[in-house]
Amino acid sequence: MKEIELYTDGACSGNPGPGGYGFVLKYKEHIKEKSQGYASTTNNRMELMAIIKGLESLKESCNVKVYSDSKYIVDAINKKWVYKWEKNNWLRSNNKPALNSDLWKRLLELVEKHNVEFNWVKGHAGHPENERCDQLATSAIKETPLIERDTV
């Protein structure tokens, strides 16, 4: 299977507010970048959307190393919280609904298709690909027209 690196970031101007995502895919010497802006969303939704859209852009099953500055996402996957939410009908341990379950469901489908490893990187710390994803996400907020709904 191909070895892919996927760098992602989400941004929001207000939370909720206009937002965007950006990702950088690397395969050998090939690099693909993509971003999109949304009229009304949250930062966590854009963080999730960046990973989803990056994984969806792959044409075949791959080994993917995801790099995200979202502890929310990396911990939810690596500490298996999201699988507990799913098993509990998208309720957290406090019986409150798990937020963003629509996007989590889509992400879990993609994780089944690929061999995905989630890695946390510190945001705004000079990591070149993370900084590029941040630029893509924040510039997407300023592009028009923005998509109204941030669903997959």
Image (tube, grey):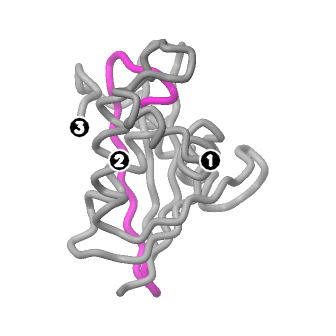
If you read the primary sequence from the N terminus, does the residue marked by circle 1 or circle 2 appear first?
1
Residue at the spot 60% in from the left edge and 61% down from the top edge:
129
Q: Is residue 151 left or right of residue 71?
A: left
Q: Local crowd at mark 2 within 10 Å, few (<14), some, or many (≥20)?
A: many
Where is residue 151 shown, x and y percent of the image?
A: 25, 30
Q: Quadrant of the N terminus?
A: bottom left
Can residue 28 be found in the magenta stretch? Answer: yes
Disc 1 + disc 3, Cβ < 8 Å: no
Q: Is residue 27 left or right of residue 123?
A: left
Alpha carbon distance from label 1 to label 2: 16 Å
Span shown in magenta: 27-45
Residue at the spot 36% in from the left edge and 53% down from the top edge:
34
* Front position among marks 1 and 3: 1
Where is residue 15 shown, x and y percent of the image?
A: 52, 14
* Front position among marks 3 and 2: 2
Can residue 135 be found in the magenta stretch? Answer: no
Residue at the spot 49% in from the left edge and 14% down from the top edge:
95
Label number found at residue 145: none
Where is residue 89 shown, x and y percent of the image?
A: 34, 27
Mark 3 lies on residue: 152
Where is residue 17 shown, x and y percent of the image?
A: 44, 14
**Amino acid type of the residue that numbered disc 1 sits on in the rendered structure:** Lys
Label number found at residue 79: 1
If you read the primary sequence from the N terminus, does the residue marked by circle 1 or circle 3 appear first?
1
Q: Quadrant of the C terminus?
A: top left
Q: Relative to 137, does residue 44 appear above or below in the rendering?
A: above
Mark 2 lies on residue: 107
